[in-house]
Image (cartoon, rainbow, N blue to C red):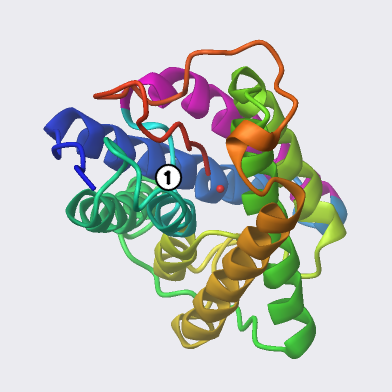
Amino acid sequence: MISRPVQARRLIAEYLGTMLLVVAVVGSGIMADRLSPGDAGLRLLENSIATMLALAVLILVLGPVSGAHFNPVVTLADWWSHRRDIGAIGTVEAAAYVVGQVFGAVSGTVLANLMFGLPAVTWATTTRTAPHLWLGEVVATGGLIVLIFALIRSRRTQFAPVAVGAYIGAAYWFTSSTSFANPAVTVGRAFTDTFAGISPNSVPAFVTFQIIGAAVGLAVVAVLYPQPSAVVAAPAVEPLADRQTANASPVRSPS
């Protein structure tokens, strides 16, 4: 396999995209907590709407640059699924994406804290440790992977901004965990003791079950979409990521 070269602009896009996504998640959570302190349901609604809209915009803006993963499990799923393809994301680039995403998530939390007059880092105390929450993360992450690869393999990636944003907004409500579905975002949210926070002690299990969810999602994709050429395709569209060759991977988007 000939992997595409690592380009700084892709890494910058992944860093900025993940950072701004977390700013939306944490910042809207803080604002919701201040505006609706007595209504948890309303706070979650405000938080979910801000997140889904911000995510859609970020995918639309940064998708043409890096593919708008903003999520380590999306990056790893892309790498694994296209590891034999010429021009696809390579091991080094995938690792660089993940590092950029994690640093972006932490930076986003710090920025959100500072914007609302809080200390840069306030370690979260909200414990999210229970089997039903872990199951929620498997469902949320697996569904996200299925959605992304379904769009790619049916050549409908032009709908990714709306579809991924809508899915994450809905998953806030139909999963017990409120759909973190993103290891980088999960790590970032440990740095704020606000509405969106998660205790550092709860992070490892969440990340583990997110990875399991991604594996389940890829298994479902393998059954439903065994290979791109076998799918009855919609009109071809430009992939979300610019490609070095005509055969490069078009996977892109996160939460």
For image coordinates 71% across by 31% down, the residue present is: 163
Looking at the image, residue 170 lies above or below residue 188: above
The residue range painted magenta reads 42-65
Where's residue 253, x and y in %? 51, 38
Please provide percent x and percent y for residue 141.
Answer: 64, 60
Residue 72 to residue 248: above or below: below
Residue 97 percent location from the top left of the image: 28, 49
The residue type indicated by label 1 comes to: Phe
- Image quarter of residue 18: top left
Q: Quadrant of residue 88?
A: top left
Majority secondary structure in the magenta region: helix
Q: Secondary structure at mark 1?
A: loop
Which residue corresponds to the image point at 79% horizontal and 82% vertical from the top-left?
Answer: 132
Given residues 126 and 235, the one toward you in this image is 235
- Residue that protrudes farthest toward the front in the picture: 230
Q: In the shown orientation, is residue 236 left or right of residue 207? A: right
Q: Is residue 179 visible?
A: no
Q: Which residue is mark 1?
A: 70
